[in-house]
Amino acid sequence: RKEVEQDPGPFNVPEGATVAFNCTYSNSASQSFFWYRQDCRKEPKLLMSVYSSGNEDGRFTAQLNRASQYISLLIRDSKLSDSATYLCVLPNTGGFKTIFGAGTRLFVKA
Amino acid sequence: DAGVIQSPRHEVTEMGQEVTLRCKPISGHNSLFWYRQTMMRGLELLIYFNNNVPIDDSGMPEDRFSAKMPNASFSTLKIQPSEPRDSAVYFCASSLSLGEQFFGPGTRLTVL
């Protein structure tokens, strides 16, 4: 099993829709996670940090389910500008090695 | 404030040539990461420095790849000799200890 697994998508949704992505992880000792956003031909940028049970920032909500070992990202009221690839990240796994998921592609259509 | 600076932004070279990628981390950050991104393999960590010391280079694909960090404000990733399969986008990122990583704009490398 990969350390971090994501559905590559793409997810095609209309503006205003609610969309959710999941990310599963294998290291049960992981305590924190990140969601990064990467626009086409750009560098990844931090979207949200996830500690304990979850985090909310405006239209974005990240939740952590330790029992099932997955984190989720929920985007409400999708905007065209939300179109990007969303990367699930496990920081600081044993030996300070950061693990990036392969990413989930989202397309928001008018 | 300046972010992570990488140069060159684009590099096109022929197989067998030496390629050197450069990175200037954010001032005050003590951790530096080199990543490679391709469509097939996604984002891969190549090597990680902490306080200028290489901590984990297990992601370096082979001996053709080498990385140095002579001081806190500069790092290089060298490929010698380069091969077509090295074509990718190479990102440098820095962080304060093990916090959020800030990425540079990347170097798009094409080896013909």
Image (cartoon, helix red, strand yellow):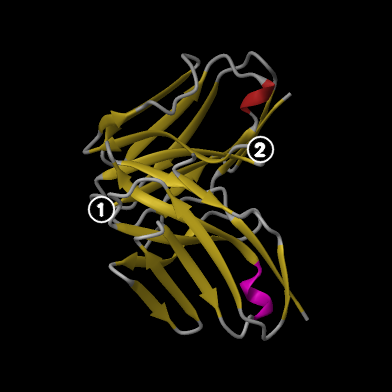
What's the residue type where badge 2 is placed? Met
Q: Nearer the viewer, mark 1 or mark 2?
A: 2
CA gap between label 1 and label 2 equals 30 Å
Reply yes or no: does residue B55 show up in magenta. no
Q: Tell me if residue A11 comes above or below residue A23 in the rendering.
A: below
Q: Which mark is residue B8?
A: none
Q: Residue furthest front?
A: A67
Q: Position of residue B22 (x, y in %)?
A: 45, 36
At horizontal 53% and vertical 62% (from top left) the residue drawn is A22
Q: Tell me if residue A48 comes above or below residue B26 in the rendering.
A: below
Element carrying mark 1: loop
What residue would you read off at disc 2?
Answer: B40
Q: Chain of mark 2?
A: B
At horizontal 36% and vertical 66% (from top left) the residue drawn is A49
Q: Chain of mark 1?
A: B
Foreground residue among A106 and A22: A22
Residue numbers of the magenta segment: A79-83
Image quadrant for the C terminus of chain A? Answer: bottom right
Q: Earlier in the sequence, mark 1 or mark 2?
A: 2
Q: Position of residue A47 (x, y in %)?
A: 45, 67
Mark 2 residue crowding within 10 angstroms, few (<14) / some (14–19) / many (20+): few
